[in-house]
Structure formats: structure tokens, C-alpha cells
Image (tube, grey):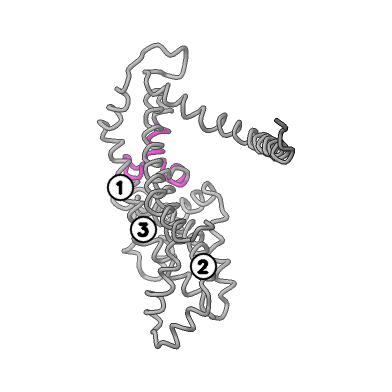
Amino acid sequence: MALDPTASAHSRLGRIRWTTIVLFLLPALALYALFLLYPIVQSIRYSLYDWNGFGPLQEFVGLDNFRDVFADERFRSALTHNLIIVVLSLVLQLPAALALALLLNSKIKGRAAMRTIFFAPYVLSEVVTGVVWRQILRPNGLLDQSLEGVGLGGWTQGWLSDPDVVLYSIFFIVSWKYFGFHMILMLAGLQQIPEELLEAAQIDGATAWEQFRYVKLPLLMPTVRVSLFLSVIGALQLFDMVWVTTKGGPIGASSTMSTYLYDRFRDSRFGFASAVSIVIFGLSLVVALFYQRFALRRDLEGAGPGA
């Protein structure tokens, strides 16, 4: 029975196509496995041992490190600080970024310059930002002198030394740096809304609030959800800014899970620190999967069959 030359040609083209795809993906997959999957597997392995970073792995402790992590009051305190930053970001930072994006999306004089000014802090590195604000907020620093200069000397605080204030100072610094990033994201989302929809709403007599509530906000929700996700993940993994400004102090009042993790490495408790890293990874993974299941999936389903 003669073979169909057309089918044979299609089969060869299919094999060539898949070979090409594999060859292009292989370098990326190799790098992904080397720099992501392998460290995760090794961290899981180390977390099962009581290991100081020197010599072979010998003292197997199973899940004891994980039990000790959650039993440690310092870790629970650090986790609470992360959650406070998450809540403050969702309640204050993102709504303020949305409000400013709405303002800068309108036709006001100097909006291009204001967009640049608000976005500029995001360009700075975390270390530079932390060093600058540490100098501004130090005792008798620029902020204290400015308050005293306008007759508000009684408002001065131990911005980075008072356990009751330091965490909120850290949140302010983080918001100052990332506020413009979220504003730009939402501004880009607003500019994707067709003008025809807003004009139709105006013709129907919708007020500015009704246009926002029933036209702009529903169409902006995919962007808001992305911004929310990035904000939550960033707050859970917060390290650089805290370490540069306070190193988690005073007395752990500004510690986060990442600074707690770094302190355990400095104590040469590598097995225990690996367990902490797995806990942080697990929390971030749960948030990412939750977002994938309940937010991103809905956005893709609403995008139509071509999504």
C-alpha cells in the first residue's frame, strides 16, 4: 500500500517544528532548572537537617525545623509585620495610586511633568532609597528640622527608633518608592478605556462618579488585580528597604520574614534558615496560585476565545 506523500510531508514538517521548538526552549529551561528549581530542591533538602553550613549533612531532624519556625515568637512577629504592610498597601497605597492616576489622566496643565515626578522614585534602587530616607528620618535630621522650622517641633518622633512608629515609617518609605509604579500601571489601564464608552455615558447623563463606578472601574479591574498581586508579593518578600534602614530593629519592631531569614543565616543556622525560606516561598506560592485561580483565570475567560 503506497504512502500518501502529502501526509508524509506533513509528518516531517511536524517533527521539524517540534525539534525547533525544543531547541529554542532548551537553553531557557536549563537556566530555569539551574537557578530556580535546583536551589528550591536544595533548600528543601537542607531544611530537613540541623546544619551549620559546614561539613556534610548528618543530623537529620525531619520537620522539626518547620515546627520550630512557627513556634518562634520572633518569626510570628515578623510575619505579622509583613501582613500589616500588606493591609496598609491595599487600604492606602493602591487607592491613593488609583486616585492620582485618575487625576493625571485628566487634561490638566503640567500632567506630563507630574507623571515623571511621581514615577521617578521607582527608578532608584532600594539601597539608595533606604540610605536617603535613613538620613532624612534620623534624630535631628531633615524631617525633624523641617517640622521645627514651621513650628511643629512637638510632632517629631523617633521615626526609626521608636518601636511603635518604625513600622509605619518603613511603610511610608516603601509607598514613596512604589507609589509611582502602581500609578503608572493604573494610568496605562485608564488610557486603554475607549473614549466612546465615556462619551456614551455622558450623553446618558452619567455623573463623573457614575462614569468611574460603572465604566472606568469595571474595565480597570484587570489592571487593579495585577497591581494588587504585585503589591502583596512585594510586601511578603520585603527585605532590602528594611535591612538598609533599620536591620529589623529596634528590638525586632520592623523585622520581616526576610530579615528574620537573613539573621538566621548570620547565626549559621543554615538548616533552620532553609526551613524559613521554604515557608516564605510557600506563602508566596499560595498567594500566586490563589491569584491564578480566582483573578487571572477570570480575566482570561472574559477576554474571549482568542485569549
Q: CA distance from mark 1 to mark 3?
A: 23 Å
Tell me: 91 left or right of 129. left
- Reading the image, the residue beneath label 3 is 90
Q: Residue at x 28, y 40 (%)?
A: 77
Residue 187 numbered tag = 2
Mark 2 and mark 1 lie on one chain; the one further toward the N terminus is 1
Q: Quadrant of residue 238?
A: top left
Labels 2, 1: front one: 2
Labels 1, 3: front one: 3
Query: Measured along the vertical axis of the image, is residue 58 above or below residue 257?
Result: above
Q: Residue at x 64, y 35 (%)?
A: 22
Query: Measured along the vertical axis of the image, is residue 293 above or below residue 30?
Result: below
Q: Amino acid at mark 3?
A: Leu
Element at badge 1?
Answer: loop
Q: Residue at x 41, y 38 (%)?
A: 258
Q: Residues within 10 Å of mark 2 (few under 14, many from 20)?
A: many
Residue 141 shows in the view: no
Q: Residue lying farthest front?
A: 1
Q: Amino acid at mark 1?
A: Pro
> Residue 257: percent from the left, percent from the top?
37, 39
Residue 163 numbered tag = 1
Element at badge 3?
Answer: helix
> Residue 224: percent from the left, percent from the top?
43, 61
Q: Which residues are magenta?
A: 241-263
Mark 2 and mark 3 lie on one chain; the one further toward the N terminus is 3
> Residue 215: percent from the left, percent from the top?
42, 74
Q: Quadrant of residue 18?
A: top right
Q: CA distance from mark 2 to mark 3?
A: 17 Å
Q: CA distance from mark 2 to mark 1?
A: 36 Å
